[in-house]
Amino acid sequence: MLTILNVTGYHSTVITTLTGENDVLRQEALRQLVDGFVAEYTDMGLERLDGEEADYARMLGSVQSLPFLASRKLVVLRTPGANKEFTEKFDTFIADVAETNDVVLVEPKLDRRLSYYKQLKKLTDFREFAVLDANGLVRYLADSAVRRGGSLSTADARLLIDRVGLSQLTLQHELDKLLAYDSKVSRASIELLTERTPQSSIFELLDAAFAGNAVRAMQLYNEQRDLRVEPQQIVAMLAWQLHVLAIAKAAGNRSADTVAKEAKLSPFTVRKSQGLARRITMQRLKQLISELRTFDVRLKSESLSADEVVRYYLLQLASD
């Protein structure tokens, strides 16, 4: 984090980077920063610029100019990295920020190979928000309900995800509706107020792939993409389904209800997975989990087409 101290020792400037493909968490973080600033200094000191529209001189002038009718100024720059001059002069840019000003850089997507990315990590309060997998979404929903004065059990959070999918924005909207109905969200209220998303399930996708039906697997994958489900989300859903499959496989002949209770899953989900688990060896299952983990790491660290990587993984699975 870059914090510039003035001669009295009090903090003068903080430059924060908000990045990552999780739009919900990134926007929440931005809102908290802006709301906290406005509460203390009023919106007279708030300025927003879009890096795809403002030139370098305009952005530099904004962070250099003193606040008007406020004791501090907050400059929010969205995608400033879209401006080539900004990335080339970034170290100079931050050195020229006035000590009365704070800066927030919002960069939804960053190329990790560029020196600009490395400078942001080194010189700013760097906060990266990744897309949450199913387990992360369960925790997010439960914590979000508590922060807003309500409650949602992990089992019911999983039920909500099973019904409406892994889109965090959609889940957030559904949680808003459920909390407005009753601060204690229950299975009954979820089934009453939400509708199952009209989309093929990742379970069906895996089932088709395991059956060697590559055509059906690609059809189901395309349905997910047509519904604007991003490849990264599909990877997260695949990881979750393989996790449930591993639980079902390790449980052997134990009943679905017993496994569901101990693993805090729905019995319906366990029963579906038990059928699939009988058709795959534990060794093969471990291999699939390892391969998916490798693909996930590569997607996060290399410049690869996420769509092509997921398609390759599914076709490879179907060809075995």
Image (spheres, rainbow, N blue to C red):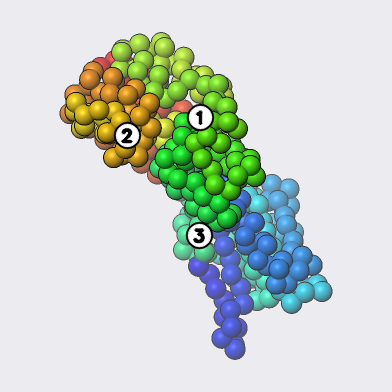
**Whether residue 202 is situated above or below residue 147 in the rendered picture:** above
Q: Picture coordinates of residue 268 (x, y %)? A: 38, 26
Q: Picture coordinates of residue 48 (x, y %)? A: 73, 57
Q: Picture coordinates of residue 15 (x, y %)? A: 58, 66
Which of the 4 image quadrants contains residue 278?
Answer: top left
As helix, strand or loop, the secondary structure at mark 3 comes to: strand
**Sequence order check: which comes first, mark 3 or mark 2?**
3
Mark 3 neighbour class, 10 Å CA radius: few under 14, some 14 to 19, many 20 or more: some
What residue lies at 46% left-to-right and 34% top-to-bottom? 159
Given the image, on which type of amino acid does mark 3 rest? Phe
Q: Are marks 3 and 2 in contact (CB under 8 Å)?
A: no
Q: Which residue is mark 1?
A: 163
Q: Are marks 3 and 1 in contact (CB under 8 Å)?
A: no
List the single residue furthest toward the right.
69
Evaluate whether residue 293 shows in this view: no
Given the image, on which type of amino acid does mark 1 rest? Arg
What residue lies at 35% left-to-right and 18% top-to-bottom? 207
As helix, strand or loop, the secondary structure at mark 2 comes to: helix
Mark 3 vs mark 1, foreground winner is 1
